Image (spheres, helix red, strand yellow):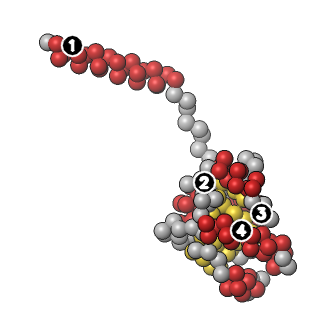
């Protein structure tokens, strides 16, 4: 009889905790619904449909880059090769070639870590915060292992021209950029 009473007390405690949690739980945020701009499909459409906060926390629609040649760099502050190539990506953005390509960085980390990083390391291109969902987005571009850095060259027509896993070889990249329209 003692065991039954103990089980009853435990059951009442769990029921009470569940009832309290159910009445105090914050509602789930409404899902973000976005549609890709016309004229693009596949992973480029998925990326263009995203609205991500920049390193200052301001949300921006990535569709603003539609119609431009893009070099999309998936990176993280804790990834040494990612950090090593950032000055070269900034140099590229500021160069003559930078007039025909827009570099954007998609950070795979927390907003606070990325904000802290970009306060210390200045970059000449926009940085967006995707968190772990950035890994899934990079997988859609063919990064099946989720390795970083991962960079995607996208033509102004919305097609993926080339992907690069690991630290960029800038001589090869410049040759690929020269072939863009």
Helix, strand or loop at label 1? It is: helix
Question: Disc 1 vs disc 2: Cβ atoms closer than 8 Å?
Answer: no
Helix, strand or loop at label 2? It is: loop
- The residue singled out by tag 2 in the image is 109
Q: Between disc 3 and disc 4, whose residue precedes?
A: 4
Comparing 167 with 158, the one in front is 167
Cα–Cα gap, marks 2 and 3 = 17 Å
Above/below status of 91 relative to 15: below
Helix, strand or loop at label 4? It is: helix
Cα–Cα gap, marks 2 and 4 = 16 Å
- The residue singled out by tag 1 in the image is 5
Cα–Cα gap, marks 1 and 3 = 65 Å
- Residue 59: horizontal and vertical position, in percent? 73, 49
- Residue 2: horizontal and vertical position, in percent? 16, 13
Question: Disc 3 vs disc 4: Cβ atoms closer than 8 Å?
Answer: yes
Residue drawn at point x = 14 percent, y = 12 percent: 1
């Amino acid at each position: 009889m003692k065991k039954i009473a103990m089980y009853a007390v435990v059951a009442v405690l769990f029921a009470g905790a569940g009832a309290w949690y159910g009445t105090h739980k914050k509602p789930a945020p409404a899902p973000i619904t976005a549609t890709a701009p016309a004229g693009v499909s596949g992973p480029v459409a998925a990326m263009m449909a995203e609205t991500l906060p920049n390193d200052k926390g301001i949300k921006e629609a990535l569709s603003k880059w539609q119609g431009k040649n893009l070099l999309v760099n998936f990176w993280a502050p804790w990834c040494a090769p990612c950090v090593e190539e950032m000055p070269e990506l900034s140099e590229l953005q500021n160069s003559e070639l930078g007039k025909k390509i827009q570099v954007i960085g998609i950070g795979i980390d927390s907003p606070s870590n990325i904000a802290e990083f970009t306060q210390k390391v200045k970059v000449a291109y926009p940085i967006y915060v995707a968190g772990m969902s950035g890994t899934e987005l990079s997988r859609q571009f063919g990064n099946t292992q989720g390795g970083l850095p991962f960079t995607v060259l996208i033509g102004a027509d919305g097609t993926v021209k080339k992907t690069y896993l690991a630290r960029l070889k800038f001589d090869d990249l410049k040759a690929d950029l020269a072939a863009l329209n």
